[in-house]
Amino acid sequence: MAADGGEFRLEEDTEILRDQVVFHRMSLGEYCREFSESELDERLVPWSRVTIAGILRELTNYEFDWSDCVHRHVGMVVRNEQPQHRNGEADVFDTWQVACTRSRLAADHLESLCAQGKFTDERLRMALLPLGATYARYLAQLQLLRTERQ
């Protein structure tokens, strides 16, 4: 939607979803910094198979999928394979951060893509909603496991 000065602006709902994803990324980043590299691959509680590294791997794939969706419309090169992670690798957190940076760079193009008619606010919301929901689900799961661990 064009602002009063003719400049395109995303609808408020779309901006809220985008900001929600940014908040979830920051929350997960802070949570992960509490653990050493070796702890990322450990089960948070004995009865659960969940590890922080596993969650980071999943979210890395979501981030790359999101940024690739935007980059395709900008005409940028997209990756053609998922990042490879093996248990015990310390770079899982770093790879997730790279994926988030790539997503932030892609998000810089959202207004111009909508202004050019390559995206609509509705389509952006449909792309942002699963990303935000996945972050929210994993953060809630981590909080429950953290509580159980204490």
Image (cartoon, rainbow, N blue to C red):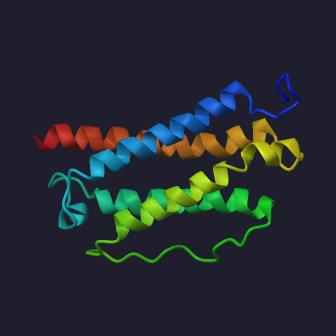
Q: Which residue is drawn at 18% across and 37% down?
A: 147
In the rendered image, the residue lying farthest to the front is 5
Q: In which quarter of the image is the C terminus?
A: top left
On screen, residue 81 versus residue 114, left or right, reads left
Q: In this view, does 44 lie to the left or right of 76?
A: left
What x and y, as percent, mark residue 77?
A: 71, 73
* Quarter of the image where the N terminus is located: top right
Question: On the image, which quarter does residue 70 sit in?
Answer: bottom right
Q: Can residue 4 be seen in this view?
A: yes
Q: Position of residue 122 (x, y in %)?
A: 77, 36
Q: Is residue 66 among the parts visible in the rendering?
A: no
At a point 39% along the width and 45% down the height, the residue shown is: 138
Q: Position of residue 40 (x, y in %)?
A: 25, 62
Q: In which quarter of the image is residue 55?
A: bottom left
Q: Residue most toward the top?
A: 4
Q: In the rendering, at what x and y percent does residue 118 appear?
A: 86, 50
Q: Which residue lies furthest to the left in this view?
A: 150
Instruction: Please report the residue visible at 23 percent of the width from the left and 43 percent of the height from the top.
Output: 145
Residue 101 in the image: above or below residue 2: below
What residue is at 67 percent from the left and 63 percent from the top? 68
